Amino acid sequence: MLDKKMVSIVLILFSMSYSFSQSNHREERTVIKNFSEALFDNSVSPEKVVQEFMIFDIDEKKELQIAVSKATAHITVIREKVNQDGGWLLPDYKVAKEKEYKIEWFLDFEEISILKLNITAEKKKNVYVLLNFEKNKILQYFYLENNKIRSFSLFVKMNDAWFLSY
């Protein structure tokens, strides 16, 4: 009798934990979805995309202005090169043409990543990915902090990748 109660308690706790972890990523998914839509929407200015969705860890006003300017310029370049291969810089501009995709926590899909992210295990907890509809290919990586995009682009050399900071 005691064993059945223990099993029931463990199952209830597990299901609560699983449900909490699923809902815990809902806000991040929404941020990424809205950012991804705005990223390739020419009716939304790059400045507005940066202002609304991105976060910078810079205290000095002049350095912050430079970082915002770099991020804005990067978004402009991405929009101009929609039909081209990104090469050593992700996101691949073809992502704009994806009609159906999924947004997931990177740690749940790390095994399908062809890139080795050069960040700490602790920071990997803040990484999310945009996957194709079948969830078997990572199309884009996002590094979030406080429900804002810290970085959405990777510098890639061979199979190693580093998030760009602005």
Image (cartoon, grey):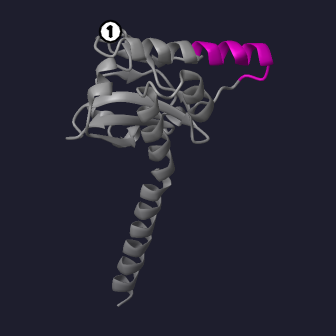
* Residue where numbered disc 1 is placed: 87
In this view, 156 is above or below 37: above
Q: Position of residue 19 (x, y in %)?
A: 42, 63
**Mark 1 burial class by Cα count in 10 Å: few <14, some 14-19, many 20+:** few
Disc 1 marks a residue whose amino acid type is Gly
Q: Position of residue 135 (x, y in %)?
A: 24, 40
Can residue 155 be seen here? The reply is no
* Front-most of residues 67 and 117: 67
Can residue 164 be seen here? The reply is yes
| Residue sitting at x 38%, y 18% | 90
Q: Quadrant of residue 84?
A: top left
Q: Position of residue 62 (x, y in %)?
A: 77, 13
* Front-most of residues 141 and 52: 52
22 magenta-colored: no
In this view, 62 is above or below 129: above
Q: Is residue 50 left or right of residue 15?
A: right
Q: Quadrant of residue 9?
A: bottom left
The furthest residue to the front: 43
Q: Position of residue 126 (x, y in %)?
A: 51, 37
The furthest residue to the bottom: 1
Q: Is residue 96 left or right of residue 124?
A: left
Region of the chain picked out in magenta, as a range: 58-70
59 magenta-colored: yes
Q: Quadrant where the C terminus lies? A: top right
| Residue sitting at x 49%, y 18% | 75
| Residue sitting at x 54%, y 24% | 45
